[in-house]
Image: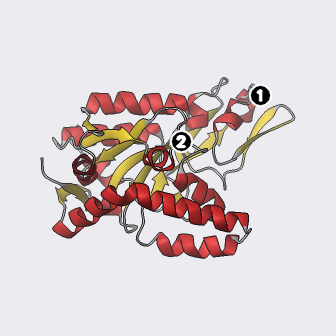
Amino acid sequence: MSYHKVKNGKLVPAGRFQVLVDNFYARNEPMIIRVLDAITRFFVKLKARPVLWVLSRLMGTVLPTGEVVTTGRALRFVDAVSRLDRVEIAVGPCMCQKALGKRSGTYMKDMVILYGAEAYKAAYPAEYRDLSAGEAKEALLAFEKEGLIPTFYSCLRSSGWIYAICNCEGKICFPFRAHQAAGAVMHRGPDVVALNREDCTGCGTCVERCHFGANRLVGGTSEVDLTKCYGCGLCVSTCAGHARKMAERSGYSPRYYPIDLVAGAPA
């Protein structure tokens, strides 16, 4: 299987430089996470968040950053890739849990895609395994049920360099914690929640499911702060009153999720 990347809504061979960069990062990711985690904790303890703000933006130019999407969009990506006969998907251990020696929930949830799949299988041949399109979709649905955030990650802030669908949680996941501390690591996706308060049952599940603090109960009814909604859709999938749905985000500018590739895939 050859390496592939996204370019102009199509899959094309990845360049040698891109492959070398991703291979280097894959082999050193646990060490990079440990170092960055220590730095982040140090400056948080010092309450020096302005320093973290600057560092996050500087490091974000070379280190991976992500775009949050719904599970539905992730499933459509898998369908699109499979229709193009380029099923380059593998799954392995959560790199944050592996690097930091902590465990929470599903461990095998690092879904690497396209040229990233080849890089991580080469770096950790005993830990990553290929997935069929069907297996990948089953895994994504299970991750959604668990309450994990589907996030398309890319290197060098390039829309063509997506290499993984990371399924993040809020306790151990370093990118999520770093983003909460300083921002600029995880970006809002193409969708945002739309709420019909009249159908809300006040169950509070949306508050529990939202990692970004966008939901709250006011007088027994849910309210959503759209400025905090990243568009993961986790609150929609478990809404007891079916009071929520996902809508296109106004003013959205495509970042990493390959909308053109998905839309242009054969039926």
Task: Tell me the residue at 48%/71% (across/down).
Answer: 59
Q: CA distance from mark 1 to mark 2?
A: 34 Å
- The mark closer to the camera, 1 or 2, is 2
Above or below for 31 versus 17: above
- Specify whether 58 is left or right of 164: right
Secondary element under disc 1, as helix, strand or loop, is loop
Looking at the picture, tell me which residue is in the foreground, 256 or 172. 172
> Which residue ends up furthest to the front in the rendered image?
101
Task: Tell me the residue at 63%/27% (across/down).
Answer: 242
Would you name the residue on which mark 1 appears?
Answer: 202
Looking at the picture, tell me which residue is in the foreground, 54 or 37. 37
> Which residue ends up furthest to the left in the rendered image?
1
Expressed as whole percent of the image width and height from the top left, the position of residue 228 reads 66, 53
Residue 73 in view in this figure: yes
Expressed as whole percent of the image width and height from the top left, the position of residue 244 reads 62, 34
Expressed as whole percent of the image width and height from the top left, the position of residue 13 reads 15, 59
- Specify whether 5 is left or right of 145: left
Above or below for 234 versus 17: above
Asked if labels 2 and 1 touch by Cβ distance under 8 angstroms, the answer is: no
Q: Amino acid at mark 1?
A: Gly
- Specify whether 65 is left or right of 237: left
Expressed as whole percent of the image width and height from the top left, the position of residue 144 reads 50, 33
Colouring used for the render: secondary structure
Looking at the picture, tell me which residue is in the foreground, 179 or 37. 37
Residue 251 in view in this figure: no
Q: Earlier in the sequence, mark 1 or mark 2?
A: 2
Bin the neighbour count of mark 2 within 10 Å (Cα to Cα): few under 14, some 14-19, many 20 and up: few
Residue 102 bears which disc, if any? 2
Secondary element under disc 2, as helix, strand or loop, is loop
Q: Quadrant of the C terminus?
A: top left
